[in-house]
Image (cartoon, rainbow, N blue to C red):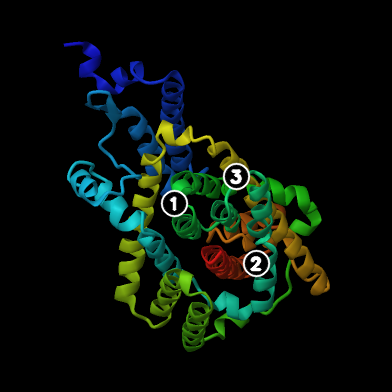
């Protein structure tokens, strides 16, 4: 027996094109790096650790499936024939999870439900004007990237899917790409989640570039008891009304609205058993398999898609523009409130809950440990989720009917 037939992960490297082999090696190393960065909390560990392992495994575990056929035993994201699908679900170990939760958007809804359970909507009700103004400005990347993507030759659906990356909300990207750009679903989702974790490391530099030090330490004079006065009844009413209105306006995004607001309703209704079930099992299970699945989808052939470089550039641009827009929104509120506001809160309008809110508070605390902006940052964060969901509904509705 040829020794390369025995150790097929290595043997397949001698049977593939040189560029595939190079990218396999690069992605194996990159996967290991993501695990390290996640474990060190430099990037989001809940996504990066399983994603890194999946990425390194999928590019290592390539084998000969038959004569002139090279593949893996993880998943086949492009299989659509029902007979072939039923056969492959008995072979590829992650195929059932991918088919029944990932490729139909269910996993996005489970994550959104979990986000709803851990979200205190009272921050929005206490500061609705501030939160919504900042959130709308922070959609700059979601709106402005669309025409730019069209100039790069992407279709309407592809342009909308990559533009939603600017909202920094992974489930929204999953939902939009599955609906409007199935052919680019895998690379768009990979790009989105890679960049969402990079908001940890990139946005602090944007804050320091756009906001002078004396403003970053600004103390907001406010009555903190405003949030505590909002009752669970008021929060529950808001969740029911907002869910109904948004589902009426944008039924294509109704599964996302329902998932988010039912999570809030469970939290505010005091249904602790459901809340623990959704937070401890649904949310973390969905997040784990989301990260693992994204890593497994990062095989060299997918990354070598000729459109991947365009998607990388557009994803980065969308998040950059949204960050700039959010900070500009923070400045608008700063001047509107007669300078009784900290413009750093603007970055939290980019709805990577609660990452960007934590980034805002961390940058403020570095300058002034007595300045607390988390209450306002979470309001902008949650409003950002709502505005991104609305834009998702608009994009899907308009483009689906074109």
Residue 89 drawn above or below residue 251: above
Crowding near the residue tagged with mark 1, few <14, some 14–19, many ≥20 C-alpha atoms within 10 Å: some
Q: Are marks 2 and 3 in contact (CB under 8 Å)?
A: no
**Residue 313 location, x and y as percent?**
62, 41
Q: Nearer the viewer, residue 359 or 172?
A: 172
**Residue 382 location, x and y as percent?**
56, 69
Q: Based on the displayed image, in which of its 4 quarters is residue 261 positioned? A: bottom left
**With 147 as the anchor, is 163 left or right in this view?**
left
- Residue at image mark 2: 135
- Residue at image mark 3: 201
At 20% from the left and 18% from the top, the residue drawn is 6
**Residue 186 location, x and y as percent?**
44, 46
Q: Total marks drawn?
A: 3
Q: Earlier in the sequence, mark 1 or mark 3?
A: 1
- Residue at image mark 1: 182
Question: Under tag 1, what secondary structure?
Answer: helix
Question: Under tag 3, what secondary structure?
Answer: helix
Residue 90 drawn above or below residue 224: above
């Amino acid at each position: 027996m040829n020794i390369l037939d025995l150790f097929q992960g290595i043997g397949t490297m001698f049977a593939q094109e040189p560029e595939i082999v190079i990218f396999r090696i690069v992605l194996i190393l990159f996967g290991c790096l993501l695990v390290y960065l996640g474990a060190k909390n430099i990037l989001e560990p809940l996504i990066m650790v399983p994603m890194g392992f999946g990425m390194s495994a999928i590019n290592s575990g390539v084998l000969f499936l038959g004569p002139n056929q090279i593949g893996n035993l993880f998943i086949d994201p492009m299989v659509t024939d029902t007979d072939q699908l039923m056969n492959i679900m008995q072979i590829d170990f992650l195929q059932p999870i991918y088919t029944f939760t990932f490729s139909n958007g269910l996993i996005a809804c489970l994550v959104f439900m979990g986000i709803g359970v851990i979200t205190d909507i009272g921050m929005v009700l206490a500061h609705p004007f501030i939160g919504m103004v900042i959130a709308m400005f922070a959609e700059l990347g979601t709106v402005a990237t669309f025409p730019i993507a069209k100039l790069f030759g992407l279709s309407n659906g592809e342009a909308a899917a990559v533009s939603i990356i600017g909202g920094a909300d992974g489930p929204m990207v999953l939902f939009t790409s599955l609906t409007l750009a199935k052919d680019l679903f895998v690379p768009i989702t990979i790009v989105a989640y890679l960049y969402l974790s990079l908001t940890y490391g990139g946005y602090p530099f944007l804050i320091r570039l756009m906001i002078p030090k004396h403003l970053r330490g600004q103390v907001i004079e406010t009555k903190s008891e405003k949030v505590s006065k909002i009752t669970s009844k008021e929060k529950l009413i808001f969740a029911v009304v907002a869910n109904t209105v948004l589902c009426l306006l944008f039924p294509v995004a109704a599964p996302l609205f329902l998932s988010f607001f039912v999570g809030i309703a469970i939290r505010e209704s005091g249904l602790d058993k459901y809340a623990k079930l959704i937070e401890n099992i649904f949310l973390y299970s969905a997040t784990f398999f989301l990260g693992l699945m994204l890593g497994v989808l990062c095989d060299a052939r997918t990354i070598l898609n000729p459109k991947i470089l365009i998607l990388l550039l557009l994803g980065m641009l969308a998040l950059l523009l949204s960050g700039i827009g959010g900070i500009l929104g923070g400045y608008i509120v700063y001047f509107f409130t007669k300078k009784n506001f900290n413009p750093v809160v603007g970055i939290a309008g980019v709805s990577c809950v609660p990452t960007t809110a934590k980034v805002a508070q961390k940058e403020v605390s570095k300058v002034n440990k007595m300045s607390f902006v988390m209450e306002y940052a979470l309001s902008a964060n949650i409003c950002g989720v709502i505005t991104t969901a609305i834009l998702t509904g608009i994009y899907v509705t308009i483009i689906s009917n074109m």
